[in-house]
Image (tube, helix red, strand yellow):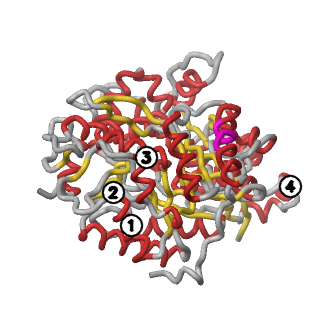
Amino acid sequence: MTVDQTTFRKALLDPEAARPDGLSDGKGRSAGRRFDVYRNNVTVSLTEALEVGFPVIRKLVGQENFKLLASAYLRRHPPRSPLMMHFGADMPSFLADFEPTRQTSYLPDVARLELAIRESYHAADADPISPAELEALPPETLIGSRIRLASSLRLVRSPWPILSIWRFNVEEDAKSPEMAAEDVLVARPDLDPVPELLPPGGAEFINALLTGATFGDAMDKASEASRNFELPVVLTLLVEMKTLIEIGG
Amino acid sequence: MLDATAHEFARLPDAPGVGYKPQHFNEIVDDAGPVAWLEIHAENYMGDGGRPIAQLRHLAERFAFSVHGVGLSIGGEGPLDSEHLARLKRLVDWLDPASFSEHLAWSTHDSAFLNDLLPLPYTEASLARIAEHVDEVQEVVGRRMLLENPSSYLAFEESTMTETDFLREVARRTGCGLLLDVNNVFVSATNLGTDPVSYIDAFPVELVGEIHLGGHDDDEDDHGAPLLIDNHGSEVADPVWSLFDYTIRKSGPRPSLIEWDNDVPEWPVLKAEASRAARVLEAATA
């Protein structure tokens, strides 16, 4: 009796499946619940990886519900890579579709924010442009320039107050969230990612820069999107968060 | 087979090491005690940058490193993941660790990674496959590797050879060294009703480049027989220390690691475990 890895794997991920034959306790008896050690290891270790990756989702749904959610997730979307730092990328769409969470419309966007923070944490390092370098640039040169942003920068836009929800669950003394759309910039000024609320037009401005628009075109995009767009506010934020890496042609 | 003389790995010091946990960074820098080297799980340091890589670069100036992979799935029925192998090569190339090791186990099948070290039968077919995989790893990474004995909760009826014979033969065919996890030996022997001391006696200790020590948990099987779970979540158990002592008397001092991955304790607790390992190693030198 041979036990192939297809059989083994199926039985690992499906608690209802029969345990494979051909496994023993080493003393001639069937392995029985010894197989469940592996089942348990797989479920527990992958659940823990999701708990580490989505602490706010876990708080929002509660620890026991999160275990059920994780158990469903890891069966529907088992990791495709041994890098646990990437596990959970399908969480937003999963939450939007999963019966017990689909009514809670803000959850997928909170998950996107948590993913953005995790991606930022592991992103490549880069030396930012100093404020002095930026100030030394003649305005007409800046207007026509394209700007390379840090690879640790992420933009998460939501019709929900996702950053307020995140802060309420992470920071002590955070205000309780009020209904508002929120655009969030995630950046890594040092070694820890920091999420910051973007002012009106900020997301359009950054998005334009990310897609290769010149500084001037990005300003136009932002002004079109919001009459309240204030370049100095957004630019100061981007400089302080050390997100501007290179000014090119 | 990789030419062992050309690619001989620079060995770790014959002293205690610990599995590195980021929460211990400051204390390790301030007072490492007897800890002479650190081990990392390769997969946790395959990001592009940020704090994990920054800490590693800093520590690598002071400590020897062991890169311990948990995701290659050397025992897998399918081919090795070439992307993952390339990531491993990149890490080993820039960090230049004193040792690189992986497990006699599988974890990926049909492109799903199961995040556990899963068991395999010891047969001619699995031996040929694993020797081929070890050859490929050593060829790509460009150095000898160490292969670790697993902890077992069950046995395959189809197995035709013992684990020690199997490991010895993989090492003979590929030129790889072995990582002897003494806790795994104790856990497997208890679980499968064999004798841990006989296992050490049958093990080719001359090929051991590193020893692992870790904690286990107690459970039982359907028949009330003891079932030990290798969880790296507590102090090393006394019978495992005894087995370690026995092993070191046979092998002489070896780089010996305290593995503590779950419910990670405060640094002084981990340091005390390393000190206990240091005393065993020193006694063998005296």
> In what element is the residue under mark 4?
helix
Q: Can you tell which mark lies on residue B81?
A: 1
| Residues at marks 2 and 4 touching, judged by CB atoms closer than 8 Å | no
| Residues at marks 1 and 2 touching, judged by CB atoms closer than 8 Å | yes
Spatial distance from mark 1 to mark 4, Cα to Cα? 48 Å
Percent x, y for residue B272?
68, 35
Q: Nearer the viewer, mark 2 or mark 4?
A: 2
Q: Nearer the viewer, residue A229 or B51?
A: B51
Q: Check disc 2 and give the amino acid type.
A: Thr
Q: Can residue A148 be seen in this view?
A: yes
Q: In this view, does B246 lie to the left or right of A26?
A: right
1 and 4 marks on the same chain? no
| Residues at marks 3 and 1 touching, judged by CB atoms closer than 8 Å | no
Q: Can you tell which mark lies on residue B108?
A: 2
In magenta segment, residue B276? yes
Q: Can you tell which mark lies on residue B184?
A: 3
Spatial distance from mark 3 to mark 4, Cα to Cα? 62 Å
- In the figure, B172 relative to B197: above or below? below
Q: Earlier in the sequence, mark 3 or mark 2?
A: 2
The residue that mark 4 highlights is A135
> In what element is the residue under mark 1?
loop
Q: Check disc 4 and give the amino acid type.
A: Glu
Instruction: Tell me where the magenta segment starts and ends, as one range.
Output: B273-277
- Mark 2 belongs to which subunit? B
Q: In this view, does A1 lie to the left or right of A88?
A: left
In magenta segment, residue A167? no
